[in-house]
Amino acid sequence: MPEIRVTVSEKFDKLLETGLFASKADILRFATIMYLKELGFIGKRKAETGNSSTLKSKPESQSP
């Protein structure tokens, strides 16, 4: 299994000590997911991609 090693700042290391995350792997996993969401690779909803027909309303002049 590939392994990734990083050097972290003292501030980041203190964040790990607060217990907010159970391990370094958890915080890096969270950061990776948030980054991928920000880039738009994951987490898009149908309404954001324009594939949802529920958001479109019919003009008033048309009958059902």
Image: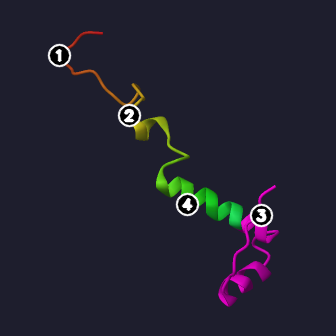
Residue 27 position by quadrant: bottom right
Instruction: Give the mark nearer the N terminus: 1 vs 2.
Output: 2
The three-letter code of the residue at mark 2 reads Gly
The three-letter code of the residue at mark 1 reads Ser
Q: Which mark is residue 35?
A: 4
Relative to 42, 8 lies left or right: right
Q: Position of residue 45 (x, y in %)?
A: 50, 40
The three-letter code of the residue at mark 4 reads Tyr
Dot 4 crowding, Cα within 10 Å, few <14, some 14–19, many 20+: few
Q: Which mark is residue 30?
A: none
Foreground mark, 3 or 2? 3
Q: Which mark is residue 50?
A: 2
Instruction: Give the mark nearer the N terminus: 2 vs 4.
Output: 4
Q: Position of residue 55 (x, y in %)?
A: 37, 31
Residue 31 position by quadrant: bottom right
Disc 3 element: loop
Residue placed at 77% from the left, 63% from the top?
Answer: 3
Give the distance between the C-alpha atoms of the residues marked 3 and 2, in whole angstroms. Answer: 38 Å
Give the distance between the C-alpha atoms of the residues marked 3 and 4, in whole angstroms. Answer: 19 Å
Residue situated in front as seen by the camera: 60 or 19 = 19
Disc 2 element: loop
Q: Can you identify the residue that label 3 sits on?
A: 3
Residue 4 position by quadrant: bottom right
Magenta stretch holds residue 61: no
Instruction: Give the mark nearer the N terminus: 1 vs 3.
Output: 3
Q: Can you identify the residue that label 1 sits on?
A: 61
Magenta stretch holds residue 10: yes
Disc 1 element: loop
